Amino acid sequence: MAKKRSAGRLFVYFIVICILLLLLAVGGAYLYLRHMLDGMERTSITKDDTELGITEETASDDQIVNIALFGVDTRDNTDTGRSDAMIILTVDQVHKKVKMTSLARDTRVEIEGYGYEKLCHAYAYGGPELAIQTINRNFGLDIRDYVTVNFEQLASIIDLLGGVVVNVDQDEADVFNSMFASDTVPAITETGDIRLTGAQAVGYARNRTTGSDVARQSRQREVLTAIYEEVRSKSVLEYPKILEQVLGMCETSLASDTIMGLGMWVVINGPEIVEFSLPNSECNPYEGIMEDGLWYYVYDLDVASDVLHQFIYDDIQPAE
């Protein structure tokens, strides 16, 4: 009997030790990730809702988090240029989806202190804080944080992953080869679902010649989705190296705990990714004006806000 009790006690000790080792491993991973996240470049922005353009009427849900993603178009690896790509990233824990909404850079909006300008100019005038305020005020949103990446840095991220697979048609290949191919950037010689290098993928996303600005936004979202899928295909053992380099290329206002929480939710739930862009067909998007030598997208921002709210909060997929 004593032997049975002894064996039983040893078995319990073994289970306890395994649990403790598991907790230590998880704790070590957590501390390592926290160490990497704490090394990200951070810019503090106001926490005051009024200053961010958030009103009492603005729809808000703790389980639906909106984050502004800015791709800045600069050539010197600084993040002070115009936001050439603007995407609202929505982590929707209610409907278990990750939503990406592209906003046309040429949209004519009111920027505080500057009057009516192109949406992309807000970032150049006042950085991410003014850009967030402008989006919130013109589209009735509740964005409080952002992530910025320079297009040059984006190419490095893609190369780190071994490239990304996107669908390229002949017109897109021809435009890329005439505008972006060089001695150091290979031409695109195939069409269909093909793997592109970082420089090729960035050139593909920046193509402003093929189709409308809405088509360009679609290419940008396609590249971001391809990056996400490429990361998901990697072994967990590869994550630390990927994260360490990727996080070092990003600037954000997000706290480490927030990133950890949202990231764990995505890893655990494997949410569906859905996409949308504004303007859409309901907003009279093909009307534009020339002003001071610049062309602006002019469409009904009230309608656009309503459609956007339905997509983000009610999970209603609007017409493109």
Image (spheres, rainbow, N blue to C red):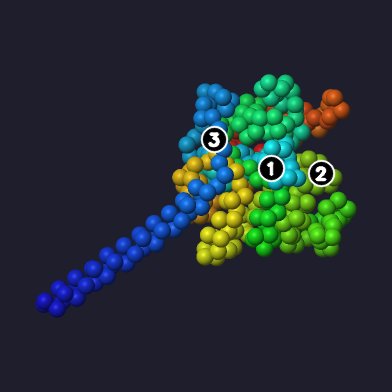
Q: Disc 3 marks which amino acid?
A: Ser
Where residue 208 is drawn, which disc sits there?
Answer: 2
Amino acid type at circle 2 is Arg
Element at label 3: loop
Residue 292 placement: quadrant: top right
From the image, state whether disc 2 or disc 1 is nearer to you.
1
* Quarter of the image that includes the C terminus: top right
- The location of residue 107, given as percent across then percent down, is 74, 31
Residue shown at 53% from the left, 26% from the top: 49
Residue depicted at 74% across the width and 42% down the height = 73
- Cα distance between the residues tagged 3 and 2: 33 Å
Residue where numbered disc 1 is placed: 78
Residue 60, position in %: x, y?
51, 32
Label drawn at residue 128: none
Q: Earlier in the sequence, mark 3 or mark 2?
A: 3
Q: Is residue 318 above or below residue 192?
A: above
Vertical order, 58 against 315 (above or below): above
Tag 1: Cα neighbours inside 10 Å, few (<14), some, or many (≥20)? few
Q: Is residue 176 left or right of residue 23?
A: right
Mark 1 falls on what kind of element? loop
Q: Position of residue 262 (x, y in %)?
A: 50, 47
Label 3: how many residues lie within 10 Å, few (<14), some (14-19) or many (20+)?
few
Relative to residue 182, is residue 319 drawn left or right?
A: left
Q: CA distance from mark 1 to mark 3?
A: 17 Å
Q: Which numbered dot is residue 44? A: 3
Q: Quadrant of the N terminus?
A: bottom left
